[in-house]
Amino acid sequence: VQTAAQQVAEDKFVFDLPDYESINHVVVFMLGTIPFPEGMGGSVYFSYPDSNGMPVWQLLGFVTNGKPSAIFKISGLKSGEGSQHPFGAMKIARTPSVAQIGISVELLDSLAQQTPVGNAAVSSVDSFTQFTQKMLDNFYNFASSFAVSQAQMTPSPSEMFIPANVVLKWYENFQRRLAQNPLFWKT
């Protein structure tokens, strides 16, 4: 966890990422102690040195008071091309082998119009919901593969049996609750 930002302008901050070649994902989150000013948020940029040691900046996404954290995949970005960024004209102290995360405080309207680099793959509730759905499908298919009719059952007093319709009912209820609120399981 890095909390020591280098302020490079009134509304811009950078964090050093030593050994960035071994980092796959970066988590950016607000600590909750100081919110963004009303109507503002922070665009999140990743910078790595190119073959000449010059910084290549790429927009990853943003954080706001309403969305105070995000996970970005950076492992595939190192070979990409840079994008337009607000850190270009600044003299930022950096070591050539160190990458940086830049935060630029901007208007929410401006953040909504920015297009992050495509392969930063921001993790979201949608990917969690997708995982959960796949897990449910896999469990139901696995459990169903052992289904036998009552006529096929061999009595075994030491084993318990769960009717397939009970598993199906649980599966359908879980899907319904997940669709209503992907985070219902936290309560």
Image: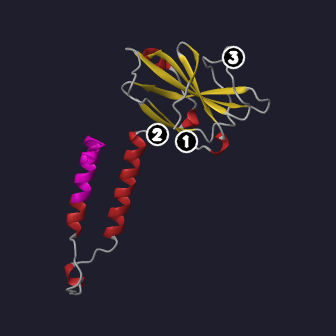
Nearer to us of marks 2 and 3 is: 3
* Majority secondary structure of magenta residues: helix
**Which mark, by number, is residue 123?**
2
- Badge number at residue 25: 1
Which disc number belongs to residue 91? 3
**Residue numbers of the magenta segment:** 170-187
The residue shown at (60%, 43%) is 23
Q: Secondary structure at mark 3?
A: loop
Q: Is residue 182 magenta?
A: yes
Which amino acid type is shown beneath numbered disc 1? His
Quarter placement of the C terminus = top left
Where, by quadrant of the figure, is residue 78 drawn?
Answer: top right
For the point 42% across and 30% down, the residue is 31
Closer to the N terminus: mark 1 or mark 3? 1
Is 4 situated above or below 85? below
The amino acid pointed to by label 2 is: Ser
Q: Quadrant of residue 38?
A: top left
